[in-house]
Amino acid sequence: MVFTVLYYKDITSRELFTNMKVSKKKLIIIQCIVFLNLALFQCSFCDQKGKFYPRNIELLSSLVDRVAREAVKCLELSEGDTVCIGHDEEDSKVERFVLDRFYRILLESGVQIFYSCDTSRNGLGLSLHVWDAGVKYHKYVGRTLFKQGKVQRMAELKLSLRALHSSTGQFVYMGDLTDHIEDQVPVVHLGDVEEGSIVIGKPSLPDEEKLRRWFEPIVVLGVMGAVTCLFYLIRSS
């Protein structure tokens, strides 16, 4: 039964191309359109497969860790030192995430953290305020008509830091700590990197995505329509 079906398909395919009277010009057009479709498919689905891209929340976490370690060096903190932290109940979810991550690095460095400051305690009073923290998509890179390309991604962090002696009230440090991390993520992987990032929200795509969202399907449908029309035109000739 299997051999019979294969033989039937083979005969049908040969008869189709034997009976059709196709000019060389039409054959060239068909070959060009088929090649264009293959190129379109290849460019759309071959963007950096198998490469790992950290999630947005992981990228911001790495940035906070780096800034916190820089603060430890700046304040010359060492294992066993005491830090008193001023607590603000009005922190947003993003600010709370950044501060908790910051304090975690202090603990990993061996620093003792307290939320209530005592003037008799020998340590530092630490005040932190988060001005900006999050992940943004800035622009498209390597993007063409038939290729989605990548999005330039940036994690940004800016916070102000004030440190003073708990016993004397003398300022030890006062200034801003800012840093950022940039990378490029293929558009096809944006859904993956945005998973688990409810705290920091979903970044907005660059504006040009709106125009491309309508233009690309029209072009693809036009190419497929041309292939279909030529196929039926040749069969009827």
Image (cartoon, rainbow, N blue to C red):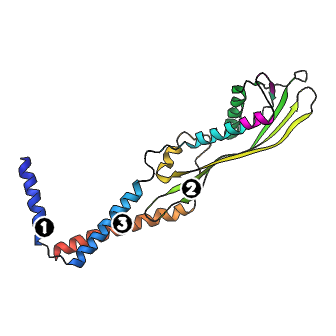
Identify the disc placed on residue 205: 2
> In the structure shown, which secondary structural element does the residue marked by tag 3 occupy?
helix
Determine whether 103 is above or below 145 in the image. Answer: above
Label located before the other in sequence (1 or 2):
1
Q: What residue do we see at 17% from left, 72% from top?
A: 235
Disc 1/disc 3 C-alpha distance (Å) = 26 Å
Residue that label 1 marks:
16
Q: Nearer the viewer, residue 218 or 124?
A: 124
Identify the disc placed on residue 93: none
Q: Nearer the viewer, residue 183 or 157?
A: 183
The crowd level at tag 1 (other Cα within 10 Å; few <14, some 14-19, many 20+) is: few
User: The C terminus lies in which quarter of the figure?
Assistant: bottom left
Per the rendered image, the range of residues in magenta is: 69-83
> In the structure shown, which secondary structural element does the residue marked by tag 1 occupy?
helix
Dot 3 amino acid type: Leu
Residue 19, image x, y percentages: 10, 72
Residue that label 3 marks:
221
Determine whether 198 is above or below 33 in the image. Answer: above
Q: Is 80 a magenta residue?
A: yes
Q: What residue do we see at 9% from left, 52% from top?
A: 5
Dot 2 amino acid type: Leu
* Quadrant in the picture for residue 107: top right
> In the structure shown, which secondary structural element does the residue marked by tag 2 occupy?
loop
Disc 2/disc 3 C-alpha distance (Å) = 24 Å
Q: Is 190 a magenta residue?
A: no
